[in-house]
Every structure is written in structure tokens, then in C-alpha cells.
Image (spheres, rainbow, N blue to C red):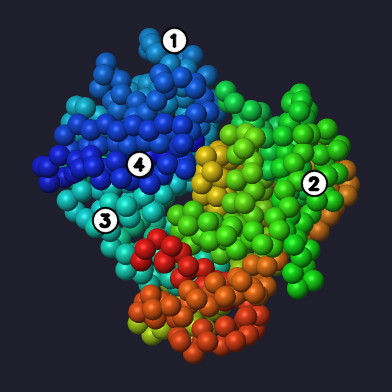
Amino acid sequence: MCGLSGEIRFDGHKADLGAVGRMTEAMHERGPDGSGLWSRGPIALGHRRLKIIDLSEKAAQPMVDAELGLAAVFNGCLYNYRELRDELRRAGYRFFSGSDTEVLVKAYHRWGPACVDRFAGMFAFAVAERAGGRLTLARDRLGVKPLYLAADGRRLRFASTLPALLATGGVDTAIDRTALHHYMTFHSLVPGERTILAGVRKLPAATVRTYEADGTVTERRYWEPDHTPADRPPHAGEWREAVLESLRTAVRRRMVADVPVGVLLSGGLDSSLIVALLAEEGQSGLATFSIGFESAAGESGDEFAYSDLVAQRFGTDHHRIRVPGSALLSGIERAVAAMSEPMVSHDCVAFHLLSGEVSRHVKVVQSGQGADEVFAGYDWFPPLAGVPREQAADTYLAAFRDRPHDELARVLAPEHLVERDVSGEFVRRHLDRPGAATALDAVLRLETTAMLADDPVKRVDNMTMAHGLEARTPFLDHELVELAAACPAGLKLAGGGKGVLKDAARKLLPAEVVDRPKGYFPVPAVRHPDGPLLDLLRDALTSQAARSRGLFRREYVDGLLADPGRDRAATGVNTLWQVGLLELWLQAHGM
């Protein structure tokens, strides 16, 4: 829901409303239904609107409450806004709209930055206080909604996308060498505050940060799930029922909207379970959407057999979207342009093409992202079973990272190398923290609180919002995540992963869906570059821009182009796609 932007100055000058306007316009696709600007002295705010709740102009942003002395911009949805509005009304607050944005404004006035503790939802917001010139930024617990920052000592600019910040100029676009190390180690994922650009940072998930008029900053991380097994009977049936009821609540919450809500149905366990629970809630004529591609290198490009089965079982209004090979190349280029940061997952291309079609039918969808990270569904989790807590980092890195630190010397140009294994250090630093009982618990905490927001979550937000489509992720409901964190590790690893979730699903889904091999949105042509895609990658990597930038060793790139399938990361990522995608992204955004 929307894109926000803004600026606060610390040097006594007025905020540059023109720059905020350029950032706002750069996010037109995220909010095609309206826009607005506001400024007062050193602070300016901008907003692009996607109308989901209260479709009237009373809910337009920036929202200014003159009586309370607050101005705010907000991206996301507060699923419990009705309950909060009732509580605030009892406390004497009066409302002029039916929007969740106004609830946020009143809640901030009532509880200050601690209002985030009361929110159930996905959000990034900025609230400016007239008295004192204070600005508060915040992001939801799981980092579903993004917030990028660029500061130079005189001012801070912020926006929902990284390219929006670039639209103002003056951003340091040098490559961050630590981030590049992460990119080549974690299949393009750059966790934490960094981005691939030295001059842009991210507000971390579950963080509230306040800027005073003089530049003083205070910050609070307000949430982290406790990955210590709960003090409750470890009976599998009780956990199964608890997980199903919590997911049921999460799905019900995400039905809140003044427009129809559909589902991105891959045919996998997670999205199929969402469809089943929506049907259980009485959703009739539910719109579901699946995508398929042409096969390549003997690999199938669709999973329609499973999505059709689920659609028929629950009587959905199902849409099969098959992308011909002739349309794939332009789809890849548009997907790269829509990325706030470079992301190698071929799911990006699928989600971008799928979202374009879905947005013609609905403005909101529920999606199954996050279940694998929360319930231990990936193949790097089982090796952690029984591993001593102190060996968690070595076991995880052996299975998860693309390549060890020493191998980067044959990939990256010497001037872009870092001496230390900064990616390994990042993992060890997180896993060494107390508070997780087992090696698996420690890794699940790392995935949930540090990795998740910068891979599947960002992927879905970027690709759907590029078409003015809001994606909601029930598996990232913070109460469900807390429950999963407390669930015994053995119940999550059972059945090859996501055991407790599979058991819960058996009450609702056909066995063929529950017990099927793990799937994804397959795009075989990206996994096996050939033809026009290979030409696109070759053009990007041999261009003058790429040669001037000099990120990669020339002989290494030449070898990949001569034999596109010769080098894959330990996780299966095609290395030519990985290095080519970064160069494509940098060129797409004018760097």
C-alpha cells in the first residue's frame, strides 16, 4: 500500500520539497491512485497512494492532524486498526476518516513511538511533530515494508525504494565492498542496514528511530521472537492445533480491505493452505493466480497440476498465466528495473510477470512467503539437527553460502575484495548471541530476524508493488512467528521440514499437495541462460560501463560467458546470472 518519502534537515535550512517531489514521483507504480506533498520548516513528506482502506480523499496522505500537531506518511496496513480505533475513541479521540493511517496518527499521539508495540500489521511510517521538529521513522517487526535512508550530515532523506533516493541526486553510488561480499556469499542477499551502494542504508526491521531537530538520534529495537522452547507439553497434536489456529487468525486479519483480496497460488503447501483457510472463512469466488513458463534444459516451467487441484477443491476463480518464451526477456528487464536492490532469485521474474496480470483483477493478494524460514522448510535446516550449539555457524555456512571467502578472490577484482570473511563474521555474530536453545533455533532466529526481510519479503514487495498490487503474508504474522519460534525443533524438522505445518494442513488439503516435493515459481530459462538471455548478460558484462566499473575479474567473466552452465554456487544459483544481474541492475538505474 503506497510509497513514502521525505527529508529532515539539521543545518537550519528548509527541507527541499522539490527533491521530495522527485522521490515521490519515482514511486508512481507503488501508488497509482494519488499523491501528496507536505512541508514545514526542516521537514518535508511525500506520498504515493494505493487505495485499499477508506477509498475516499479523507484518507489521503501526507495526513496532517492540526489539532494534534502531527503529520504522517504510511506504507502498509494495520490489520487491527478497527480495534485500535475503538480503544482510542474511548480515550476521547475523534476521527474524520475510516483509514488505518489516521489510527496510526492518533496512536502515535497517545503512546508515542511505543505505539508500534500495539500494531498488528506490516508498516513503514514517518511521523513529524510540529512542536520541537522531531521526526520518527519505524518499520514493522518482520521488515515486510521497506525504508531506505541516505544521510550526509546536513540532512536525511528516506523513501520506500532505493531508486527513489537516486532520483534526488547527491547519493554516493560507490559499491559497498562488504555488501558485495554478502551479495556473492548469500545469493544476492545483503542483510542488516547495508545496501550494495555505499551511500544508502536501510532502517532495520522491528526498529523505531527518532531524529531530533539538532540531528540527535535515538533508536529502539522493539521486537525479537524468543527461540527457546516453550514450557508446555511437547505433544505434537497440541502444537498442530495451535499452529493451525494461529495461521487461521493471521489469514483472517489479512482479509481486512475495502477492495477484493485474492491469492497467489503456486500449488505448494503454503499458498494452498491460505486458500483452504480463506474458503473456510466463507470466501466465495476467491480469485487465485498461478504462473508457468516454457521448459528449459529438461526442467519443467510450471506447477499447474498442483494449483489446478487446489483451485478445483475449493472452487476458486482460478487464473492460469502462461508466459511464452518470446515475452520472457522483456519481463526480465522490467523485473530488474523494478528491484530496489539486485535480487538473483528467479522468483523475482515470475512474481513480476504474475503481478502484472493479477493487478488487472484485484489490488490485494495473500501469499505464502516466509513459511520456509519460520517453520524450517529449506534443505539447509535438517543438517542442524543434533549439531552442538557452538557448531551452528559452521554447519549453516557449509549449506547456505554460495562460496567460501577464499573463492571470492577468483571472482572479484582485487580492488573490490575485503580481507576478512565479513559474511561469515556476520553469521557468527548473530548465532553466538544467547537466547536460542539449539543450533537450529539459533539459525531460525538468524533467518527470521536478519535474512528474511532481505530476500523473500523484499522480493514479493518489490515485484507486486511495481504494479500497484499489495501482497500480504500470513506466515509473517508476528504472533504466528512467535509461536513457531517456541515450537520444538523436532516438530519443525519432521517430514523433511515444516513437519508441524504439514500435519496441520492434512485436515484441509489433499495428500498430493501436502506430501509433494518442495516447489517454487520455476523460471528454467533464468536457471539455464541461453539464447536472448545469454546475449543480454553478455552485453551487460562486456559493456563499457561494466569494464569501467571493474567489479569482476575479466578472465572469470569471459569463462562464464563461454560456458554459461559451468559454475553454480553451492546453493544452485547460476553464477553467470548472479554476476550479470548485478551489472544489469546497476546499468538499469544509471550507475
Amino acid type at image mark 4 = Thr
**Circle 3 crowding by C-alpha within 10 Å: few under 14, some 14–19, many from 20:** few
Q: CA distance from mark 4 to mark 1?
A: 36 Å
Amino acid type at image mark 1 = Arg
Q: Is residue 577 above or below residue 222?
A: below
- What residue is pinned by disc 3? 169
> Residue at coordinates 39% horizontally, 53% vertically from top-left?
162
Residue 24 marker: 4
Q: CA distance from mark 2 to mark 1?
A: 46 Å
Which comes before the other along the chain, label 2 or label 3? 3
- What residue is pinned by disc 2? 307
Q: Residue furthest left?
A: 12
Amino acid type at image mark 2 = Ser
- What residue is pinned by disc 1? 90
Q: CA distance from mark 4 to mark 3?
A: 14 Å
**Placement of the C terminus among the 4 image quadrants:** bottom left
